[in-house]
Amino acid sequence: MKNLSILLLMLVAGIFACSENKQDTPVDNQPDLVADSNNGDIQLPENFGAVVVSDSVGRGRHIAVNENGDMYVRLRRAKNDGGIVLLKDENGDGKADSDKYFVTSTGTDIRLYNGYLYYSHKDGIYRIKLENGELPENWTEETIATFPTQESGHVSKSFTFDNAGNMYVNFGSISNACQEEKRTKGSPGQDPCPELEVRAGVWRFSADKLNQTQENDGYRYATGIRNIVGLDWNDQDNTLYVTQHGRDQLSELWPDSFTDEQRRDLPAEEFLRVNDGDDFGWPYCFYDQFQKKRVTAPEYGGDGQQSERCEGTKDPLVAFPGHMAPNDLLFYTGDQFPDKYKNGAFIAFHGSWNRAPFDQAGFFVVFVPFNNGEPSQDWEVFADGFAGPTPVKQPRDAVARPCGLAQGPDGSLYVVDSQKGKVWRIFYKSA
């Protein structure tokens, strides 16, 4: 009996010990993931934490995370002769234990789709077939589509996929406002704007057909969008969503109609729901978030009030303050974060330049709650502090600029910075 009593006491003690250890586990289903001090120098909502996966992979743009946890970061400038870096976390602590640079081209977007790694360059979209989810040692690049060379303007080719084998590609405008003389004070707009035939919109392609061209295979899906860097397909309502960068220099080009304060805040940066055939008005119109309407651009006779030229154009779902540069968009489908985040949208604001001489804005990740395919509440800042402790006068002065977003297989949110390529993994901790 004495031995039995001792055994029972040991068993009970073991149960309490297991219970205590479980309570000390820092992250649900992630026992080895512990937040960095100060969350890697960013601010997060209560009960969220972050680890710095890597602090300097290169000038990072977008990021994709595979089911096995492999992280692929697309680089704007080559590092170690590579335009993509593969990061691996071998021990599950959230930190990258190895990196591998590959692909000579540089660009912005990168995605995983149907067993392939897709990535864009200004002149095309390419892919590599993965083997059992891994990058092969002797990988081969396939060309999905090539595009006419564009040396100036908005050249990055962001893209996304739907669930029916289609790929949607941004073709940004060559100019700011389609003026006869680009970025010239008082120069009128070209009417009609010739760019709209091949630029300033979204084109649809096949996701699997090789060697496509815009001219022969592309279908113009939507028009009148100056430039998109963030696109995502929302599986909940089976619809394309994008974030638009608004035009620049209202007061510099049209000082008789706009003040510097108006130029700082206008036009809005836009979160758009995009359907086949939509027209969002560029270059003839821009969205004024204070008047809550599109108004005719000054290049086309507008005075900041009238909107006759904008009839038939589509308004944004959400209008953000101007010149904050929304550079990526992600609908959250994971189960790790609290319920309020399910099917909502995260947007990374990269920060722009056109607010000078005022302080620049952006440099954070925001969240837009969704319900039944519609924003259900006002947007809120989710992750902040990337730019550092002092006001930013020029974007280059920011410590970090969030640019790319990705969701990991466990529901963590990954953020990549474009200054040095710092990568954060954000997770929800037990309350």
Image: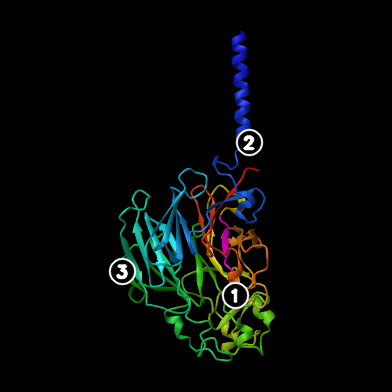
Mark 3 → mark 1, Cα distance in angstroms = 37 Å
Q: Which residue is mark 3?
A: 211
Q: Is residue 218 above or below residue 16?
A: below
Q: Which residue is mark 2?
A: 23
* Residue 338 appears in view: no
Scheme of image coloration = rainbow
Q: Residue pushed farthest front?
A: 80
Q: Is residue 208 left or right of residue 189?
A: left
| Nearest to viewer (mark 2 / mark 3) | 2
What residue lies at 45% left-to-right and 62% top-to-bottom?
74
Of badges 3 and 1, nearer the viewer stands 1
Residue corresponding to mark 1: 353
The reply to whether dot 3 and dot 1 touch (C-beta < 8 Å) is: no
Mark 3 residue element? loop
Quarter of the view holding residue 321: bottom right
Q: Is residue 376 magenta?
A: no
Question: Could you tell me how far apart the alpha carbons at marks 2 and 3 are, in whole angstroms?
Answer: 55 Å
Q: How many marks?
A: 3
Return the x and y of residue 115 as percentages of the image width and height: 37, 54
Mark on residue 132? Answer: none
Instruction: Give amino acid for label 3.
Output: Asn
Q: Is residue 273 above or below residue 260?
A: above
First to last magenta residue range: 343-353
Of the two numbered discs 2 and 1 on the same chain, state the one appearing first in sequence: 2
Q: Where does the image place residue 272, in percent across and percent down from the top left?
A: 55, 69
Q: What amino acid type should be assigned to the residue bearing mark 1?
A: Trp
CA–CA distance in space, label 2 to label 1: 46 Å
**Rendered location of residue 362, percent (x, y):** 62, 67
Q: In what element is the residue under mark 2?
A: helix
